[in-house]
Image (cartoon, rainbow, N blue to C red):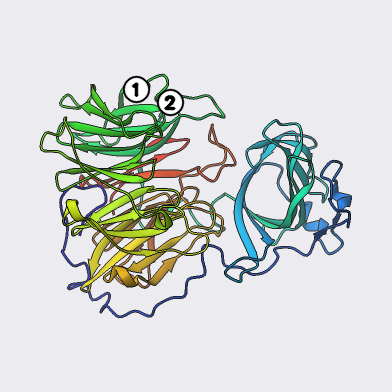
């Protein structure tokens, strides 16, 4: 079994052997997409028959809220961060009629006017007291109304439902529907942690938003992306983690004009960083606390999103829509071997991440779905199969062998995503055999498979550990809630919380969290 953060095999070659967890049998599951449609979220609607319906001047009286529960809305707290699923009806080519997508809401103090965000834009209007729930936010210019939300019900203390409209540049209503907003506090009744998972230490990262980590030579290398909203530049932060209970900040590197660094990997004395400007940035870490810049490997005008090392090769997802492969005979001097570009119909969005297992490259190809490529011969690579669905955004995966079957654990991104368990033994006929969902508006980021345990960095859901001895029935055995609304730097964006996760085999779990930085946990 390959761990997603190791260069060499670990554990049993077949996680199903001797475990008694699974005999290889499975019932194929129907694919419904990311959102399970249960109809309109709330019994309200937008009033008015004018065409076009103007957004200017829309207020609570513009909505039919006669069936709503104002008494319940009176108990909505005046602070909090929400993720909302939006639903509107539209005739689709596949016969469907509903479209779902997510959006964020952030409430801060000063309740009557302003004091919050909607879709990361400052609120223009806010009435959320005394049973009212009405908010609107501006366009990119901040002047014209862009979105309007009217609350209707409060099904649980952590959720609010209602109706919404979005507005086009001309100031007309372009879309109307219903929403269900979930406050991103811990699940009702759920403790901070379970399964014996404990926080050993925490290290603040000052650069940008930390998104990935790699651990080598008793040092944790954390990369951060720059943030346009805050103006904080990203870069590389190095911690000495010899003493896991006391990580020591050793170095911070941020290069003006090139500090959106999204992925990181180490191999021998080389550190590889995915940059959306320079491509692959190579550092010498023979002195681990003092990385020395060696070179950049240009990968096109849009740089590289993620990097991975496997079997003496470096794999990089170029944002121009391909996977670049390098030979690492000399780790500090990667030599180009091949570039893989999928056909246009399978390449929508371009490769976001990848995983290598048994001469196959598993490409998480964003809107193009999940693709399997034969790389046994780099001079003759072949697309073997693909898995996709209507609202796909394939983001990250891990692959292993269970009861003689090749199983992929595939995680999507953006609100509504969840874990899919795919039998990829025959890539031409990929079958979904299991899945695991948390709140319908949350999103997975990265995951690692080690033996029969799957470790997931699940944004606002924190760190989740699943027992996958029976891949058809993933079962949570431990968790740690790392997301806290009150942390400095929190926004209403879906990409908040646990990002990167590594298990380097030293008995600890390393996680990077968007506001808290480097978190070290005991390995279970």
Q: Is residue 505 above or below residue 402?
A: above
Residue at the spot x=79%, y=35% of the render? 113
Q: Circle 2 sits on which residue? A: 206
Residue 515 x, y percent position in the rendering: 48, 35
**Looking at the image, is 320 positioned above or below residue 36?**
above
Instruction: From the viewer's perspective, tell me whether residue 67 is left or right of residue 280.
Output: right
Tag shown at residue 79 = none
Asked if residue 33 can be seen in this view, the reply is: yes
Residue 168 lies in quadrant:
top right
Quadrant of image for the N terminus: bottom left
Tell me which corner region of the image, top left, top right, bottom left or bottom right, holds residue 266. Answer: top left
- Badge 1 is on which residue? 252
Instruction: Please count the marks in the image.
Output: 2
Q: Which of the marked residues, 2 or 1, is nearer the chain's N terminus?
A: 2
Is 25 rendered above or below residue 45? below
Quadrant of the drawing holding the C terminus:
bottom left
Q: CA distance from mark 2 to mark 1?
A: 9 Å
Judging from the image, what secondary structure is the residue with disc 2 in? loop
Which of 297 and 294 lies nearest the eye of the viewer? 297
Front position in the image: 470 or 37: 37
For residue 242, say whether it is visible: no
Q: Are marks 2 and 1 in contact (CB under 8 Å)?
A: yes
Q: Residue furthest left?
A: 329
> From what the image shows, is residue 330 above or below residue 376?
above
Q: Residue, x 85% and y 46% (percent of image)? A: 59
As drawn, is 354 to the left or to the right of 174?
left
Question: Counting other residues with Cα less than 10 Å from the Cα at mark 1, is it few (<14), some (14-19), or many (20 or more)?
Answer: some
x then y, percent, for residue 429: 33, 72
How far from the left and from the top, in percent, is residue 491? 58, 38
Mark 1 falls on what kind of element?
strand
Q: Position of residue 442 (x, y in %)?
A: 52, 53
């Amino acid at each position: 079994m390959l761990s997603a953060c190791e260069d060499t095999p670990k554990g049993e070659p077949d996680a199903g052997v001797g475990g008694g967890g699974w005999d290889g049998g499975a019932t194929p599951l129907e694919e419904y997409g990311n959102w399970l449609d249960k109809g309109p979220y709330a019994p309200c609607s937008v009033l008015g028959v004018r065409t076009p319906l103007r957004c200017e001047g829309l207020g609570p009286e513009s909505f039919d809220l006669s069936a709503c529960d104002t008494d319940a809305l009176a108990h909505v707290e005046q602070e909090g961060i929400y993720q909302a699923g939006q639903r509107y009806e539209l005739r689709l080519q596949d016969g469907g009629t509903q479209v779902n997508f997510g959006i964020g809401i952030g409430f801060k103090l000063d309740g009557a006017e302003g004091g919050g965000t909607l879709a990361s834009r400052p609120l223009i209007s806010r009435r959320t007291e005394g049973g009212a729930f009405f908010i609107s936010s501006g366009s990119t210019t901040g002047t014209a109304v862009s979105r309007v939300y009217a609350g209707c019900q409060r099904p649980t203390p952590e959720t609010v439902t209602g109706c919404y409209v979005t507005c086009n540049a001309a100031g007309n209503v372009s879309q109307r529907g219903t929403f269900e907003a979930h406050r991103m506090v811990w699940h009702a009744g759920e403790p901070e942690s379970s399964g014996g998972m404990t926080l050993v230490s925490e290290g603040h990262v000052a650069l940008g938003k930390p998104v990935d980590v790699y651990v080598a030579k008793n040092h944790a290398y954390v990369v951060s992306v720059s943030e346009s909203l805050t103006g904080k530049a990203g870069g590389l932060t190095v911690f000495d983690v010899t003493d896991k209970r006391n990580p020591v900040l050793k170095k911070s590197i941020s290069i003006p004009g090139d500090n959106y660094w999204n992925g990181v990997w180490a191999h021998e004395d080389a550190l590889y960083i995915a940059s959306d400007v320079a491509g692959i940035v190579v550092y010498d870490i023979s002195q681990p606390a003092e990385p020395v810049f060696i070179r950049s490997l240009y990968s096109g005008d849009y740089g590289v999103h993620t990097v991975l090392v496997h079997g003496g090769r470096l794999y990089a997802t170029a944002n121009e829509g391909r996977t670049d492969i390098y030979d690492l005979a000399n780790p500090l001097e990667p030599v180009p071997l091949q570039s893989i570009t999928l056909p246009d119909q399978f390449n929508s969005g371009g490769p976001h991440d990848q995983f290598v297992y048994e001469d196959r490259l598993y490409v998480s190809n964003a809107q193009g779905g999940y693709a399997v490529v034969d790389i046994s011969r780099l001079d003759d690579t072949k697309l073997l199969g693909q898995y996709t669905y209507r609202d796909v955004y394939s983001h990250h995966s891990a692959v292993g062998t269970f009861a003689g079957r090749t199983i992929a654990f595939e995680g999507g991104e953006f609100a509504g995503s969840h874990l899919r368990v795919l039998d990829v033994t025959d890539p031409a006929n990929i079958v979904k055999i299991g899945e695991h969902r948390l709140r319908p508006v949350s999103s997975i980021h990265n995951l690692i498979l080690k033996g029969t345990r799957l470790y997931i960095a699940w944004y606002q859901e924190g760190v989740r550990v699943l027992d996958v001895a029976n891949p058809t029935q993933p079962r949570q055995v431990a968790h740690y809630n790392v997301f806290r609304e009150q942390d400095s730097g929190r926004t209403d964006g879906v990409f908040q919380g646990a990002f990167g996760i590594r298990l380097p085999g030293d008995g600890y779990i390393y996680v990077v969290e968007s506001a808290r930085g480097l978190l070290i946990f005991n390995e279970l």
